[in-house]
Image: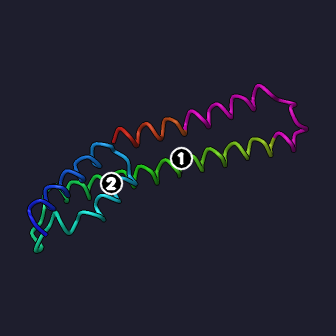
């Protein structure tokens, strides 16, 4: 592998990092790691790409967890409504549902800001 392959690998990694998309970053790291680190020489760009991949993966896991919590809360509200005779308290149920959705959105926003 030569300097051309290394330069192409670095360009691909940089483009993937700028896309800020986890699948593209994973693919670029897998495809170009050997070219960017010839002979075991550590590449600062590849290290940054790996760090960003880990950050994006963690954010994705947290977002999925928040979505799961929201679905569970909504399901609990639905079950409670059914047990209480349906729409006996629609305003309260709507408030609970809106609160659960807002909480999940806030959790996702906080995770992205971190």
Nearer to me, 60 or 4: 4
Mark 1: give few (<14), some (14-19) or many (20+) Cα within 10 Å. many
Describe residue 63's horizontal placement relative to residue 111 as left or right: right
Describe residue 62's horizontal placement relative to residue 102 as left or right: left
Q: Is residue 2 magenta?
A: no
Q: Which residue is denoted by mark 2 in the rendering?
A: 25
Image coordinates of residue 105 in percent, x first then y, are 52, 36
Residue at horizontal 29%, vertical 64%?
31
**What secondary structure is the stretch in magenta mostly built from?**
helix
Nearer to me, 51 or 37: 37
Q: How far apart are labels 2 and 1 at the CA level?
A: 23 Å
Which disc is residue 66 wearing? 1
- Rendered position, 59 above or below 81: below
Bounds of the magenta segment = 81-103
Foreground tag (2 vs 1): 2
Colouring chosen for the image of the structure: rainbow
- Rendered position, 53 above or below 70: below
Image coordinates of residue 97 in percent, x first then y, are 68, 34
Label 2: state its secondary structure: helix
Residue at horizontal 9%, vertical 69%?
41
- Name the image quarter holding residue 30: bottom left
Describe residue 12's horizontal placement relative to residue 63 as left or right: left
Q: Does label 2 or label 1 sit earlier along the sequence?
A: 2
Image coordinates of residue 68 in percent, x first then y, are 60, 50
> In the rendered image, which quarter contains the C terminus?
top left
Label 1: state its secondary structure: helix
Residue at horizontal 80%, vertical 28%?
90
> In the rendered image, which quarter contains the N terminus?
bottom left
Image coordinates of residue 98 in percent, x first then y, are 64, 31
């Amino acid at each position: 592998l030569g300097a051309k392959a290394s330069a192409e690998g670095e360009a691909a990694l940089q483009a993937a990092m700028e896309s800020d998309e986890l699948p593209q970053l994973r693919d670029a790291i897998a495809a170009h790691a050997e070219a960017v680190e010839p002979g075991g020489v550590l590449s600062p760009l590849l290290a940054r790409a790996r760090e960003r991949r880990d950050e994006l993966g963690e954010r994705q896991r947290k977002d999925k967890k928040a979505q799961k919590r929201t679905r569970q809360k909504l399901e609990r509200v639905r079950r409670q409504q059914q047990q209480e005779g349906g729409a006996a308290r629609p305003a309260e149920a709507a408030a609970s549902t809106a609160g659960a959705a807002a909480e999940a959105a806030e959790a996702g926003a906080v995770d992205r800001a971190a």
